[in-house]
Image: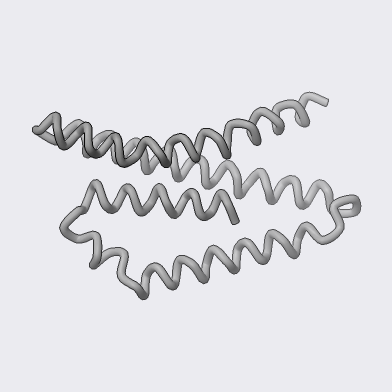
Amino acid sequence: MEPLTITLMAFDRLIAISYPLRYHTILSNRTISLLIVVIWTIGRLVRAACVDPTMYFKIASTLFNCVLWTNFCLIIVSYMRIIYAVVKMSSSTHRKKTFSTCISHVVVVACFFFPKMKRLRKVSRT
């Protein structure tokens, strides 16, 4: 659930920065509700796949890696688009505000993903 939620947060920031005037149209209550249902469904499937980790370790591990890397790639793509939108801004004040808005999410992404990736490298070496 956590990587999916963090990815949604990156998507929210992307829409807020890239399309500020269309933000409420794109992320309407219906869209947010649909995204939440999708995240809960995917999270539930992942949990169901991890019922007995000793018996299904390879399947659970592969599924976790797919979810983790897919979400990390989506976050990277979102932030690349955000950086592109910020570079196009003419005012340095607006750029600073935009980066200060995103910095808290970048810290969360780093704190969540980097230890997991480091652990995955250790597991893959053994």
Residue 82: percent from the left, percent from the top? 29, 40
Q: Is residue 65 left or right of residue 20?
A: right
Q: Is residue 121 left or right of residue 82?
A: right
Instruction: Using the rendered view, name the quadrant where residue 78 is placed.
Output: top left
**Relative to 57, residue 114 above or below:** above
- In the picture, the quarter occupied by the C terminus is top right
Please give the name of the residue rendered at 10% of the width and 33% of the height, measured from the top-left corner.
Answer: 91
Residue farthest bottom in this picture: 30
Q: Is residue 66 left or right of residue 12?
A: right
Residue 87: percent from the left, percent from the top? 20, 31
Please give the name of the residue rendered at 90% of the width and 54% of the height, measured from the top-left corner.
Answer: 55
**Relative to 50, residue 91 above or below:** above
Residue farthest left in this picture: 90
Please give the name of the residue rendered at 40% of the width and 39% of the height, measured from the top-left corner.
Answer: 104
**Relative to 64, residue 111 above or below:** above
Instruction: Using the rendered view, name the quadrant where residue 47 is placed.
Output: bottom right
